[in-house]
Image (cartoon, rainbow, N blue to C red):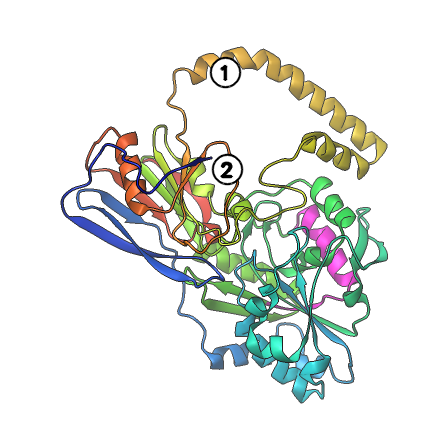
Amino acid sequence: MELVNEDETIGIELAGAMSSTQLRTAAWYGDEIIPLDFPADWEICEKWPTTPPPLTDEQITVGLENPVGQPPIRQMCQGKFRPLIIVDDLNRPTPASRVLPFLLKQFDEAGISAKNVRILMAGGTHGKARMDALSKKVGAEAAGSCQLFAHDYKLDLVNVGTTSFGTPILVNKEVVTSDFVVGIGGIYPNHTAGFGGGSKLALGVLGMHSIMHLHYRHKAMGWGVSGIESTFRRDLDEIARAIQLKTAISLQVNADRDVIRLDCGDHFVYYKDAVAFAMKAFDTSVHTGADVVISNAYPNDLSLTFVRMKGMLPLRYCGPGASRVAIASCCEGEGEHGLFPLIAPRFHRARTLFRQLSVLKPSEAARKIASRLEQKFASTFRRHGRRRAESTLKPNRPILLYRPCRRSDPLPSHISGMRVTCSWSDVLQIIKKEQGGRGNLKVLIYPCAPLQYFSHHEQR
């Protein structure tokens, strides 16, 4: 990764009238609006999703009062003493604080004081949560009255059985010691499961061995595929039932991280409709003829680990020679993922292969090894032809990462294929240099790339 100094002289001056637009950045750390100025002769196309207005308090109340396939939560938790609310972590943009006051009111009406309600942040292998992460996620009321816990995928796990797919269910002990479990999560495009949400919230409270089984024994669905009947989803459904996660509140947000849809009740029933809504609202065409493609990683721009996973997908569809820009504040710096780290440590590939083989049956392991060897030999024969073909094509340009938020943790100094700047003026100068000083550039902006679902391509 090349760091670009704000005072560095690129050698091309920007002059003349400017046009502008506005985007959001720094999820959980201010959710700021930033202006972006462009030369007036550039053609700007913004691919905003079509979403309904944010929900009012009254609409949220109505949603909780009318769950799908279940009675209201106040009725379901009658006679309970140790309820647990599972929430996703800050690597998901879900504003749990928006609905928690209404949920705590239902618990109170059932005779359960807020001080007896426990909230568990489900971070999976995302690393240790920061001190203020829980209060950011749940809000002041819940943080001041409930018992708060952050999941650790290495500690305090209880084995509650094995799924029909052979996945061991090692779950946080707080789940096992509860007598009523409800989840609050979001429904967003996801590579492994097609879409997250529903029973996938259960993955966040599991141990490493369980999470390894889920990722290594099931084929990834691909970004924005419904995946309702995938083996990955069916395995998760079994786990959710085993840990008694049968009631959930699923939120969907817009490009400003406002709640635009709430589904409550039996997530095994409502999940399909919720995903269908997301696929329609955030369906976005991909134009391959743009000179510049800008992918705003908000509202998943907490760290570069998750920006790379969820915020840069549009940059894969660029035409040859296009300038590629990602916008992400990365307020928590590099971030962490136990299975898919941003920068692979030494022997990571060997360790990953060993982990994959360790969760497979002997026959499955033999097929995987044979497949790896076949790929290795085939790549040797393809290499020469590929190099010859690639020599005739324009290579993809490095991704230019614009970090608007200056109150951010540092990033690693070396990341292949990426350069970083905190100056928008530098971004424009670098684009002009990459495009040979041409004017009338066609610019394509994806304002909330982690939420957007790409169903088809368009030439332009």
The residue positioned 66% from the left and 88% from the top of the image is: 109
Q: Is residue 241 magenta?
A: yes
Q: Is residue 96 left or right of residue 243?
A: left
First reached walking from the N terminus: tag 2 or tag 1 = 1
- Frontmost residue, 54 versus 327: 327
The residue positioned 85% from the left and 56% from the top of the image is: 159
Q: Which residues are magenta?
A: 229-249
> Mark 2 or mark 1, which is nearer to you?
2
Whether residues under marks 2 and 1 lie with C-beta atoms below 8 angstroms apart, the answer is: no
Q: Label 2, on which residue?
A: 413
Instruction: Sort mark 2 into few (<14), some (14-19) or many (20+) by Cα contacts within 10 Å.
Output: few
- Frontmost residue, 352 versus 344: 344
Q: Label 1, on which residue?
A: 386
Q: Amino acid at mark 1?
A: Arg
Q: Position of residue 388 (x, y in %)?
A: 46, 12
Q: Is residue 290 visible?
A: no
- Vertical arrangement, residue 264 with respect to residue 201, above or below: below
Q: Is residue 432 left or right of residue 395?
A: left
Q: Amino acid at mark 2?
A: Ser
Q: Position of residue 374 (x, y in %)?
A: 69, 19
For the C terminus, the quadrant is: top left
Q: Residue furthest left?
A: 16
Mark 2 → mark 1, Cα distance in angstroms: 30 Å
- Vertical arrangement, residue 384 with respect to residue 186, above or below: above
Q: Position of residue 210 (x, y in %)?
A: 77, 49
Using the rendered view, name the quadrant where residue 150 is placed: bottom right
The residue positioned 19% from the left and 35% from the top of the image is: 439
Q: Secondary structure at mark 2?
A: loop
